[in-house]
Amino acid sequence: MRSTRTAPRGARPTSKDVARAAGVSQATVSLVLGGKWQGRVAERTAVSVREAAQALGYRPNLAARNLRLGGTRTALLVVPALTNEFFGGVYTGAARVAAEHGFGVVLYPSPEGIGPARDPFDSARATLDGVIASSMAAEAVEALRGPAGGGALPLVMLDSAPLPDAGELTAAVNHDVADGMRQVVEHLLSLGHRRITHVAAAVDSWTFRVREDAFAAAMGAVPGTHAASEPAALTVMGGQAAAERALTRPGPRATALVCDDDILAAGACKAARRLGLSVPGDVSVTGFDDLSLATALDPELTTVRLPAQELGARGMSALLALLEARPLDEPRLPVHLVSRGSTAPPSAPAPPD
Amino acid sequence: MRSTRTAPRGARPTSKDVARAAGVSQATVSLVLGGKWQGRVAERTAVSVREAAQALGYRPNLAARNLRLGGTRTALLVVPALTNEFFGGVYTGAARVAAEHGFGVVLYPSPEGIGPARDPFDSARATLDGVIASSMAAEAVEALRGPAGGGALPLVMLDSAPLPDAGELTAAVNHDVADGMRQVVEHLLSLGHRRITHVAAAVDSWTFRVREDAFAAAMGAVPGTHAASEPAALTVMGGQAAAERALTRPGPRATALVCDDDILAAGACKAARRLGLSVPGDVSVTGFDDLSLATALDPELTTVRLPAQELGARGMSALLALLEARPLDEPRLPVHLVSRGSTAPPSAPAPPD
DNA sequence: GTCCTAGGGTGTTACGTATAACCCACCGCG
DNA sequence: CGCGGTGGGTTATACGTAACACCCTAGGAC
């Protein structure tokens, strides 16, 4: 009479229950269900174990398994925000590769947004096998590695500045955003634009610094061009305000706006319309990311597609390589320009219709 | 010489190490760090334990803790897709409340997208305390509850159809989307619209069925109105195609398009422009959700704001209530219309400029 | 002086799994 | 007839934590 026969609530069957039902020992259950029974357990026994497990609805207790094995086969993905579909793509890609290797991925949107009560990352560290940080600022990444005294977790950084003291347990996977910017500028130059303003995200992060540098380099390489830069808060309104400043500045007007992000580009399009300018008739606009927003706008946005899922997938692969002490390549993922309706030659005659 | 002094790699300090460093037993460490030492351990001892833990960089092993406590203080959030910022909001809200109660939230975008290799949810069930499913189809939710033989996990459904066999361990939190639709229709009617087409998401889910019914009810309540419905795939292109069909149908044209989602509304705006119609001059357009997309469009979208974070937060609260066997209310969250530039009286004279 | 109590800890066990180390019966072979 | 091998299992243990059930000492009451 120690306990009710049918477990009252949440009393999940254990491997011991399965063993009893199948008339074998717990060890045998573990062997069979763990797939390591070749030549150690008779076929008939294995079958009856599997049947018993099925009948009881047995699922192994992951906490116990993790404790035993000393690892969790789980990676943490840290992203700046989840309200951006780009990071949804990164997660999806990482989770796909993880699943193929029996790993799980836990998502952690970085501090802002989540209450300060007991940093979930902090308490989770002990049960994680590795960390993937996407587009994080350097100091935030430093904090992730923990007190440095204990076991520093393997860390993969996506689209982030390289760590100064990068240990051996670190890898990086980046988009080739510099090349993306180069493609944008070449596209515009080939259309005939010579006076181009960069609407630059006012965020201190690797990916945006690279874009600024690449923009300056690409423009500087061609004589007779006029480059300018206008900082913008990373919102639609921020893009709108920056574009408005750029387009109303005294002197000859820029004929093209290169925006650091599709969000900013959406704002730039709004600003142009408010000023009575047509896109792309009077001013061409480009973005970055190729969010679904890019095709929702009218005209559709010429933008640089960043393969977010690919980034997440490669990041997870790199982490797995790190964990298995395999050699790893740190690829620079190619990106490509998607040319749509928001760019056209400058001062073109109004479209036929 | 059994092992190197400084743990070679990943050898995290345990509570036993802390105990040795502080000169106490492991049990005392557990008491102190667990906060249950009031009147059982002297202040001085507690302090030295904490100092030792700090010095060693000790973090409790969650796998062990979970095994011991039989729970993980972790909930699973299942969403249809992560590439939609709405669900990012749901997650954020749920995670905030969870953190306040020492809970964590694991995100699981439902099957499509994630490889089929060993369903992560399936293997995770044993280590979860509950499930929150957002906007899921009925059959998918059924599957979540598992083989029904073992312990069925507490389940909270957000914006979903009520389960037919809802057990005691189930709760529901919904947006009052019917009221949202009513507000939209009343807004348009008060502007003078009488011929309105509902661009309806062709997705078999509770939230969209409710919208369709509410639209028909609100229109049916006012004599002299003409309601129509046009199904649309839940993408920009789907919305565009549906709106095009709706606006080119023979007979008097609808003066307003009520879209089930901001994404669809964006497509509808594109369709209108392609047909040479101005928004809102010739046709008014409304959306649902109030995504950032809504303010990125030009004109900005009149839409119904669904408080996604609030939904996630209330869902998590409901789950916590379920777990603690507390009475719970199943609120119907109020939503409200955000009136912007995409709606105006029908057949209005062209705007001044 | 003896008993009781409270304060301050410690020993021990259990959680569920994986696996190393055994164990035993049976069969074929010399 | 004895002996080694092998197929088919079992027993025992460890993972790190939490907490129950003790234990010991000292101080006060009688």
Image: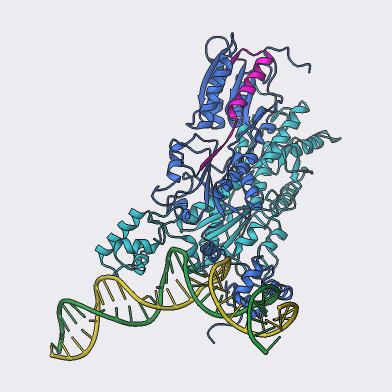
Chain colours: A blue, B cyan, C yellow, D green
Q: In which image quadrant can residue A66 be found?
A: bottom right
Residue A61 image position (x, y, % from top left)? 57, 66
* Rendered location of residue B347, percent (x, y): 73, 29
Seen at 52% across and 85% down, the residue is: A2
User: Residue visible at 82% across and 36% down?
Assistant: B245
Is residue B257 a member of the stretch shown in magenta? no
Q: Is residue A184 one of those drawn in magenta? A: yes
Residue B198 at what x, y percent from top left? 75, 43
Residue nearest the viewer, comparing A119 with A30: A30
Residue B278 position (above or below residue B326): above
Q: Quadrant of residue A246?
A: top right
Residue A269 at least partly seen: yes
Residue at (70%, 30%) from the top-left corner? B279
Q: In the depicted view, which residue is nearer to us: A56 or A10?
A: A56
Q: Which of B348 and A307 is in front in this view?
A: A307
Report how many numbered discs are placed on residues in the image: 0
Q: Where is residue D26 in the image (x, y as percent from the top left)?
A: 17, 76
Name the image quarter holding the C terminus of chain A. top right
Residue B306 seen from this side: no
Quadrant of the rendering where the N terminus of chain A is positioned: bottom right
Image quadrant assignment for residue B78: bottom right
Task: Give, as a single range, the part of the protein colored magenta.
Answer: A170-196
**Residue located farthest toward the right when viewing the structure as drawn:** B250
Above or below: residue B91 compared with residue B348: below
Establish if B24 lies above or below A82. below
Tell which of A323 and A284 is nearer to you: A323
Image-based side of B203 in relation to B311, left or right: right
Note whether B276 is above or below A143 in the view shown.
above
